[in-house]
């Protein structure tokens, strides 16, 4: 990939067009290498496996990158060039162009997976934090509605701390289409049963709404959806979206 194309990956339309996104820094590169090595052999024929990532490093990172034994293509760049490719104020001198996941790799959920559906999530930090939680506990699949923040923009990627490589995701999943895929749903509501009740763990899909508007109630009409709540003191009106998802996922994992 040409350096001019790598620069364009900071814009969503070019990420979609070129099929890659950018990750920066030692920690994210190490997580990328780990995920690529764990990639199933059956994915080798996919259009864009993680193993097709490309590293761009300055001279001081050349030996470090070689010792990773990643199998990635490694290209040398100057400090000036890496500054042009980066969107951080003080780039470390190492970044990668990572293939977007192929739809063939994320279309089918396993029987043991639970699905977390986010409806029009907008905050990159929230999404990155949620990805970290799902990766930590495992066996969760993330479904994102249309009009959600792009999970492959730099802010989400950084805040995910590498979790983005470990969580299966499906994008542009319409809420209305979930009814034909799942037989029942759970969602959060102040008047629901407590999430620590045994019934909370008995659902294949959990719905969480936009940070400001929540889950659109009219869209739930006709769904077999059950309300639950995270009990609190009542001193404030609501929880942050990422906090609500994180506590729910923890409850499902104990």
Image (cartoon, rainbow, N blue to C red):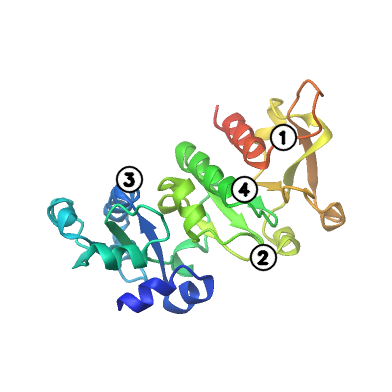
Q: CA distance from mark 1 to mark 4?
A: 17 Å
Query: What residue is pinned by disc 1?
Result: 239
The mark closer to the camera, 2 or 3, is: 3
Helix, strand, or loop for circle 1?
A: loop
Q: CA distance from mark 3 to mark 1?
A: 30 Å
What crowding class fits label 2: few (fewer than 14 Cα within 10 Å), some (14-19), or many (20 or more)?
Answer: some
User: In the displayed structure, does residue 228 sit left or right of residue 81?
Assistant: right
Checking the image for residue 27, the label placed there is 3
| 107 w.r.t. 221: above or below | below
Q: Pick whichever, 46 or 80, lies toward us.
A: 80
Q: CA distance from mark 2 to mark 3?
A: 30 Å
Question: Which sits earlier in the primary sequence, circle 2 or circle 1?
Answer: 2
Tell me where residue 204 appears, x and y as whole percent.
64, 46
Checking the image for residue 196, the label placed there is none
Tell me where residue 214 appears, x and y as whole percent.
77, 48
User: In the displayed structure, does residue 34 sit left or right of residue 115?
Assistant: left
Tell me whether circle 3 and circle 1 mark residues in contact (CB < 8 Å): no
The mark closer to the camera, 4 or 3, is: 3
Q: Pick whichever, 209 or 161, lies toward us.
A: 161
Tell me whether circle 2 and circle 1 mark residues in contact (CB < 8 Å): no
Q: CA distance from mark 4 to mark 3?
A: 26 Å
Q: Quadrant of residue 98?
A: bottom left
Tell me whether circle 2 and circle 3 mark residues in contact (CB < 8 Å): no
User: In the displayed structure, does residue 181 sit left or right of residue 16?
Assistant: right
Residue ID at (51%, 46%): 131
User: In the displayed structure, does residue 229 sit left or right of residue 87?
Assistant: right
Query: What residue is pinned by disc 2?
Result: 146
Helix, strand, or loop for circle 2?
A: loop
Question: Which sits earlier in the primary sequence, circle 3 or circle 1?
Answer: 3
Query: What residue is pinned by disc 4?
Result: 116
**Can residue 110 be seen in this snapshot?**
yes
**Can residue 69 be seen in this snapshot?**
no
């Amino acid at each position: 990939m040409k350096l001019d194309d790598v620069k364009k990956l900071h814009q969503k339309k070019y990420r979609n067009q070129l099929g890659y996104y950018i990750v920066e820094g030692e920690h994210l590169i190490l997580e990328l290498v780990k995920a690529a090595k764990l990639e199933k052999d059956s994915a080798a024929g996919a259009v864009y496996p993680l193993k097709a990532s490309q590293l761009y490093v300055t001279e001081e990172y050349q030996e470090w990158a070689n010792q990773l034994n990643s199998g990635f293509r490694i290209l040398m760049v100057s400090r000036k060039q890496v500054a042009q490719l980066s969107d951080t104020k003080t780039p470390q001198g190492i970044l990668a162009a990572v293939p977007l996941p192929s739809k063939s790799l994320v279309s089918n959920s396993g029987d043991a997976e639970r699905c977390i559906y986010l409806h029009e999530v907008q905050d990159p930090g929230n999404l990155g934090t949620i990805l970290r939680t799902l990766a930590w506990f495992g066996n969760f699949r993330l479904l994102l509605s249309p009009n959600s923040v792009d999970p492959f923009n730099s802010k989400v990627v950084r805040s995910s701390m590498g979790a983005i490589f470990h969580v299966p995701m499906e994008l542009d999943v319409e809420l209305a289409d979930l009814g034909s895929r799942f037989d029942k749903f759970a969602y959060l509501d102040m008047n629901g049963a407590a999430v620590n009740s045994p019934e909370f763990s008995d659902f294949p899909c959990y719905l969480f709404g936009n940070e400001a508007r929540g889950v659109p109630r009219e869209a739930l009409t006709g769904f077999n959806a059950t309300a639950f709540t995270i009990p609190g003191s009542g001193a404030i009106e609501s929880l942050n979206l990422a906090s609500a998802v994180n506590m729910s996922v923890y409850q499902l994992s104990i």
